[in-house]
Amino acid sequence: MKPLLLIFVLLISAFGCRYQEDVIRQGGSLSFVRAFTQAELEETTLTPGLLDSDYFDVILETIVVPIGTGLAYGESRFDTLVDYKLYFQLTKSGDPDFLKARKSLYKYYKTIDPDSFVTTNEKLAFYINAYNFFTLETVLLNYNDGKLRSISDIGGEGSFSAFTKIFHEISGKSISLDQIENEVVRPLVNFADARIHFALICASNGCPILQKKSYRSLIIEDQLDFATKKGLLLDRIANFKGNSLLLGQIFNWFSDDFTNDEGSVTAFLQKYLPKEAPLIPGNFDYIEYDWSLNASH
């Protein structure tokens, strides 16, 4: 999402409380997304050998809805939406495997120390998955019977508080979505792998594609390539009109990352767009970002 002013993390004493849909209506400056009480998480046992991606796949495969969109430059393209209504229903009375996966993810992120991972790719997959999971959960817990129209309205219309003032627990520490993106993920790749901006999905129709599978360290290079190439086929990300080119706002907000990656935005596009794509013009403009919820209905 668009970089916002980072704020200092303050501590609050409500760690044992359940927040659910009330997050959107809370007063004060800070809130925690906590779908389960401390006692409920203590009762949850993680399956030895399973990673966050194993649990997250169960959720993604259930609620992510693929949409076929034909061909672009000779390549097949697709998009996805999220069935938040089903997501909400399943959290109330759903499949036991789905409920266990969701609770296990909270337990996993609460207890696993990402500093124990050996490789950068392990940490990168962990934090991308955490960002996407907690984004989905932030929407879910503020779903308000389908009345929520944009993640940007949580905490106040157009406030973007969901990214800076709602906190999640990773390894016993509180962290916002904005901090995961700008203080962890981007530094992990030295602000020089712009493919991450096709993997971090902010629950909006202006975002690239939320994949139906989570990220895994052993294949994350291929997954990032795939997400980038497929994302660039969407008109909201790269839209050629005659001799002009309109780009998604990620190229504007994170232009330095694209430059650090391939030398320029143009060079990045040349690398990941199909060879059959039109010639990239010397100048381009940006598409207004669509913050409406990426809901399937």
Image (tube, helix red, strand yellow):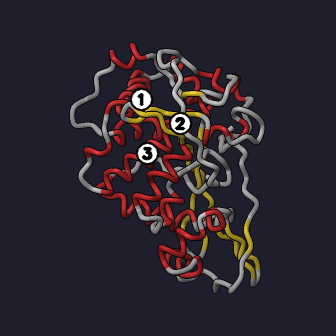
Check disc 2 and report the residue beneath it. 9
Tell me where residue 102 appears, x and y as whole percent.
43, 29
Q: In this rendering, which labeled residue sits more in front, label 3 or label 2?
A: 2
The quadrant holding residue 99 is top left
Q: Which mark is residue 79?
A: none
Q: Residue at x 43, y 61 (%)?
A: 224
Classify 10 Å Cα crowding around label 3: few (below 14), some (14-19), many (20 and above). Answer: many
Contact flag, marks 3 and 2 (Cβ < 8 Å): no
Q: Quadrant of the C terminus?
A: top right
Check disc 1 and report the residue beneath it. 106
Tell me where residue 163 appears, x and y as whole percent.
61, 42
- The answer to which of 27 and 229 lies nearer the viewer is 27
Residue type, mark 1 in image: Tyr
Side of 117 relative to 227 (left or right): left
Depicted 9 relative to depicted 124: above or below: above
Check disc 3 and report the residue beneath it. 129
Tell me where residue 87 appears, x and y as whole percent.
56, 30
Report helix, strand or loop for mark 1.
helix
